[in-house]
Image (cartoon, rainbow, N blue to C red):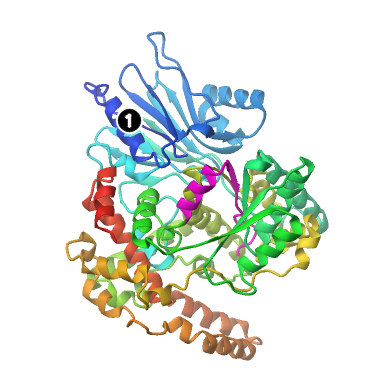
Amino acid sequence: MPGVFGWIDLGQDTAGAVADTPELLAEMAQRMSHSGRERVDTWTDRNGRFAVGRVAPRDLVTLPWPEAAGDGVPDERAFLDGVLQGDAAHVTSRLRDFERRGRAALPSLRGYFTAARWEPSARRLTLAVDRRASRPLAYTLAGSRLYFAPEVKALLAAPGVGKALDEAALGLFLGAGYLLSHQTLFAGIRRLAGGEALVAEPGRVRVEAYWRYRLSEQGDGTSPLELEEELAALVRNAVERDLGDPDRAVVFLSGGVDSRTIAAAAQGLARRCGTRVSTVTWAAPEARDGSDRDVARRIAEALGTRHRAVVRQVTAWGQRLTGVTYLLDGLTDISAYHPHEHAVMRDLAAGGARTVLRGDESFGWEPHVTSLEEAWLSLNLRSPRLLKHVGRLVRPAVLARLSAAAEAALDEAARPLGGEHPDNARDLLYFRHRLQSYLGSAAYLKHAVLDHRTPLVDEALLDFNERVPAHLRAGKLLFSRAAARLAPDLFTLPLASRGNLEDWGRLLATRSPVRRHVEAELADRESGIWELFDREALLAALPPLGATPDHAASARFERGAKRIAHAALKLTPSIERHFVTRAHRAGLRFDQLCLRVMVLKAWHDLFVTGDGGRRALEARLAKVD
């Protein structure tokens, strides 16, 4: 990480293009160098029509980079960053095939990669990301050039890139804390989704799907028992393929199904190698029975892994939020909720870790749904129009625009799902948007310094899912059975029944670093973000110091009310769904909205008011407590 970046000139006049190439590529690379251990490779077309670079942690570079362009007859060149599956001979064969055939060869590539193919005779560039967009790629047109890079901030280094805000993306951010997979917060900067390729040539730029995630309502007729056995083997193989050196691998372990399954398969391979893997669990300072921290400790003891709990801190929260917002380009609220994580990744790398494995749910994220709206709401993707608190904190004219734009974007994203079974629609939306956008940002904190792998969305598993009936995916039914087959002893241990992360409502109501940072940000009258949000209303909405947060004070009452309501409505599930759906359309706590505004303010100050460069970051950090 980060990956491949550069530009192609699509105009007729390329005079002066070569002159600015070294400086521009250097600035783009510098904005994406986050660990201090990066290696930068570049390549420039001798006619000044195309320039490309790669920036990646020095010890994680595995794919060769083409030699510099010479004076001979120009020919096709392929540029890849990441990891391809297979031995050296197979990888070399796949690279040559992509160099020769371009887009037609993409479906045969397996791994974690971004790719570029240059055809000088046609002045055609093909850019692509893997099936999960695990290494992101953003792009924009400015003048006659198309610029591309893994990070938005690198694109802002180019002359003439527009900064008009994407109102649909802003609206969705308020309700979900993330965007649709193709969006950024700038209207003129887009991202490739998994399985997509961008083809740029004079007079035309188009995005094409070379692969699509497909699901089936009825499956292919294979018996549930056979599917269960096959899935268990596929999961084990995917984990072992991704693990690398067990002594330098870390598995992130929670109290749920996914991570214990990955940890069991990883430890099985490590045991055969005469060693142990390391497992890590996030935790707040206060230990809680039945939490992820508690259950993960018991899982690690049963497996015999080297385990530790990393206690999350909110010290220097404003500084960390700023740094992670810069790293993630403000694409999600991860920078507010997990600002400590990037520092932990650097510590793991300094301690010798190379590979980290994490679970991403793609086997039926939630129980059965009955409509497309329920599918959207299960992902928290909704119009801001009805969200609690938003109406009094977002300026009315702004809210109307953001809502209309968000609703149009959701309608457009739903268009290809017409006729799909609602459970299939939910899983397809989850894979394309939440996994690639929200979880992709969480992965980027790891990608920036380590080799991050997600074996549960391995290509073989994605293909397998097409054969699984919807009713076996819903509620992760088939996967849970396969996981229990893989590690039966671990499934005698309970699943985590409660979280073990920060109570953000309490932190906002006490003299904490979170509260201090929010107050300081609201005291900054000059930020352009207040054209969208009512600063005075936000300040007035802060809970009094020492107050019990509403969601904590009413939690016991709400749990009791839900039990009574569920008992009363269980004989009329359609009515129950109506009330649950109506509540979910508007459900948003003040602390969630407040923290998302803090991320958007940091982003605006860095990338809209500022130019997205390191100096803008340093200037903001100097102002933050």
Give the x, y percent position of residue 167: 30, 59
Q: Which of 267 and 181 is in front in this view?
A: 267
Res 613 visible: no
Foreground of the two, 171 or 159: 159
Residue nearest the viewer, comparing 383 with 116: 116
36 sits to left or right of 404: right
Alpha-carbon neighbours of circle 1 within 10 Å: few (<14), some, or many (≥20)?
many
**Element at badge 1?**
helix
> To which quarter of the image does residue 91 belong?
top right
Assess whether residue 158 is covered by the magenta stretch: no
Query: How many dots with numbers?
Result: 1
Residue at image position (80%, 60%) is: 488
Residue pictured at 48% horizontal, 55% vertical: 341
- Could you say where residue 129 lies in the image, as x and y percent from the top left? 50, 39
- Determine whether 533 is above or below 454 in the image: below
Residue 517: percent from the left, percent from the top?
31, 66
Examine the rendered structure and indicate whether residue 561 appears above or below residue 162. below
Q: Position of residue 547 (x, y in %)?
A: 38, 85
Seen as rendered, the residue at the extreme front is: 351
- Determine the residue located farthest toward the top in the rendered image: 72
Report which residue position mark 1 lands on: 25
Residue shown at 42% from the left, 50% from the top: 182
Tell me the magenta residue range: 341-365
Residue type beneath disc 1: Leu
Where, by quadrant of the figure, is residue 137 drawn? top left
72 versus 598 height, above or below: above
